[in-house]
Amino acid sequence: MLRDSHGIELRIAKITDAGEIDFNSLEQQFADGKVKLLAVTHMSNVLGTYTPAERLAKFAHERGAKILLDGSQAVVHRAVDVQTLDADFYVFSGHKLYGPTGIGVLYGKPEILDAMPPFMGGGDMIASVSYQKSTWAKPPQRFEAGTPAILETIGLGAAIDYVQNIGFSAIAAHERALTDHAIATLSQIEGLQILGTAQDRGGVISFTMQNAHAHDIATLLDRQGIAIRAGHHCAEPLMGRLGVTSTARASFALYTTAAEIDALATGLTRVKQILT
Amino acid sequence: MSDTAELYQSLIMDRTRHPRHAGKPAAYDAEAEGDNPMCGDRVHIYLNRENTAVHHISRGCAIMTASADLMADAVAGLTAQEIAARKAAFEAMVTTGAPNPDLGDLNALAGVSEYRSRIRCATLPWSALAQALEDEKNV
């Protein structure tokens, strides 16, 4: 979309077979010094890989670029400190943090936001208005034109309080144990292949099972009361890189239990009998 | 857990593993492609006017592949008008889940009605066939 509206050139850094950022490839993309923004996910919604955000920020800054991290997945699973990461921009959505739909967060460094013009006009985003000239409110009001999503904002605040009260160290430890258990358990199912072997990974596991189609796997698990996601996960280019058209994906959250993972493994064994 | 496999009964799995009408025929009068961008499933339909023989190349889930193959059985020898009527009856059956005696083996797919997102898998080959018929008419 930015390419069409602003004529930007989009460059793509490769990933390794393990599903991690290939820094050699990234270096090549930056070689001519023209890159202005490094936009990267903080955690892959397909492979579960955490990207090394601090290292990436340092990499971008040393080469005169800004960095934008998409934390839609990461903020749910571990504590994020945008200052420590030295992120220029950090974004996430409310509904993945157990909060309401229709709201998200864009964090930007104050000096960058200060230098940016509004992208939309409306109530509460002006400092002064005359026929000759209008001036804009300071950030963040400058970027929040019109009546805000009041209910959603309060709801997202409650969701953030909720996860913070449980604590990210407890959430991360719980999910780490679940992920280890799931990888160990699912790996025992013959013919099931887990995609991605990143060192630093969260509770998202994509897999294929011989010739069984991901949607058939999902429907058959659904019949056993187990909900997974199937498809290309809004990541078609990555599917191409992995050499698949779709994957089945199990993901874990703070309320998932080890017994549920065992039920998934049992369910998959049954699915395998039917489909393969 | 007998209920688990109901939708994937032997007829469907048999047609998925061993489709009777798969592949590109040596001669055909019309062709059309159906694809579902949501899941990447794709079916290519070849229509031979003589005896209304349908072939398909399916790259997708078991439901779609079996549906394409059973469709080829169900439309063999029918006129375009009869196919349109059968398509409508099929779509009603997979949407409501109510078996229709006129549809024979196609009733094996009635179970998809429980899965809104999967109904499209079953109807995709029929949409592609309708497109092929439309194109053929305009030739």
Image: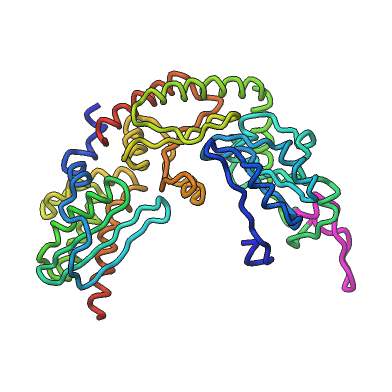
Looking at the image, can residue A151 be seen?
A: no
Asked if residue A155 is among those painted magenta in the image, a careful observer would answer no
On the image, the x and y values in percent for residue A91 come to 68, 44
Instruction: Looking at the picture, tell me which residue is in the foreground, A107 or A43.
Output: A43
Q: Is residue B88 left or right of residue B79?
A: right
Looking at the image, can residue B27 be seen?
A: yes
Residue B103 position by quadrant: bottom left
Asked if residue A7 is positioned above or below residue A87 in the image, the reply reads: below
On the image, the x and y values in percent for residue A18 come to 53, 35
Instruction: Looking at the picture, tell me which residue is in the foreground, B91 or B66.
Output: B66
Magenta-tinted stretch: A124-143
Asked if residue A130 is among those painted magenta in the image, a careful observer would answer yes
Residue drawn at 36 percent across, 42 percent down = A215
Q: Is residue A111 left or right of residue A159?
A: right
Asked if residue A239 is positioned above or below residue A76 in the image, the reply reads: below
- Quadrant of the drawing holding the N terminus of chain B: top left
What colour scheme was applied to this rendering of the protein? Answer: rainbow
- Quadrant of the drawing holding the C terminus of chain B: bottom left
Residue drawn at 85 percent across, 59 percent down = A136
On the image, the x and y values in percent for residue B99 come to 17, 48
Q: Is residue A255 left or right of residue B3?
A: right
Instruction: Looking at the picture, tell me which residue is in the foreground, B125 or A50.
Output: A50
Residue B37 position by quadrant: bottom left
Residue drawn at 33 percent across, 53 percent down = B120
